Amino acid sequence: MASYQSPDPQWHIVFDLDQLAADEGVEWQLAGISHCILQANLCLISLSVSGSDGHVCREYDVEQQGFVANSFHFPFGKNVIHWRDANSVFVAPAWDESQLTQAGLPCEVWLLQRGQDWDDADNLVVLPETALRAQAWRFLDGNLTALDVIEAAHSLDQKAYYHLDDDLQLQHLPLPLRCDVLAYSHGDLIVKLASNWSRQGQDYPSGALLAVACDAKTAQLGRIELLIAPTAQQSIQTIEATLSGIVVAMLDCV
């Protein structure tokens, strides 16, 4: 910390993109880094070629400063890949035309274990090609309670959400079609509404941020708490879940 705060901090290179590009003779550009929360030395590095929309994905160890043997790695495409734990990932593949919707985005979600052949991975969902896209991720609550969620986007503004249980079975979460599930915090799904919603005898306005109790095992929804109801001049931009609560970034009169 003292070095970081000093006028001349001592930086330590953990990944050299230019050196990789020179070694492989490819104009790699960094498209994203996803760290594994449960094993922080592991990350998935996404690399695009000359700024293309697609990318390849490789697993990297920041402590060993090298790509991981027996690693997760995926071919070029508009793939969406998220860690489930240190030895498994959710994959929405997009390296083959058969895996795409008419919008050119992934229509499938798979669960792949470390060292597993793709043919042996678990296919969790396949959407029709008329849908927009599918993706999945794992939420971790402050006590590391896990909640696996699959998002099936039927269009730009209509989405269905599902809970993936321990037997890899999908259970529909009875949320409105026009909403975004943003986090899982203290046993609550943090949900942003994109339309008005009536539930349990209460009305909730479009744009509101809600905390919806959700059991991590059964996915049963419980009480709903209105966290923020923006005025006509306000809008919620992003939220971040922390160990103690959530941080909300808002715009007020732009």
Image: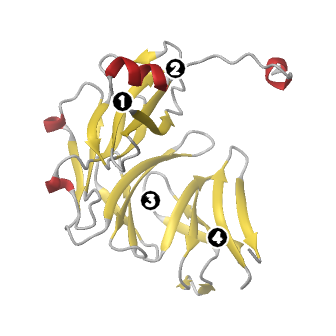
Left or right: residue 188 compared with residue 69: right
Q: Are marks 1 and 3 in contact (CB under 8 Å)?
A: no
Q: Secondary structure at mark 3?
A: loop
Name the front one of labels 3 and 2.
2
Rendered image quadrant of residue 234: bottom right
Check disc 4 and give the amino acid type.
Answer: Leu
What residue sits right under mark 4 in the picture?
A: 209
Going from N to C along the chain, the mark reached first, 3 or 4, is: 4
Going from N to C along the chain, the mark reached first, 1 or 3, is: 1
What residue sits right under mark 2 in the picture?
A: 62
Q: Secondary structure at mark 2?
A: loop
Q: Residues within 10 Å of mark 2 (few under 14, many from 20)?
A: some
Left or right: residue 111 compared with residue 225: left
Identify the disc placed on residue 251: none
What residue sits right under mark 1 in the picture?
A: 58
Q: Where is residue 226? Give x, y as percent.
A: 68, 73
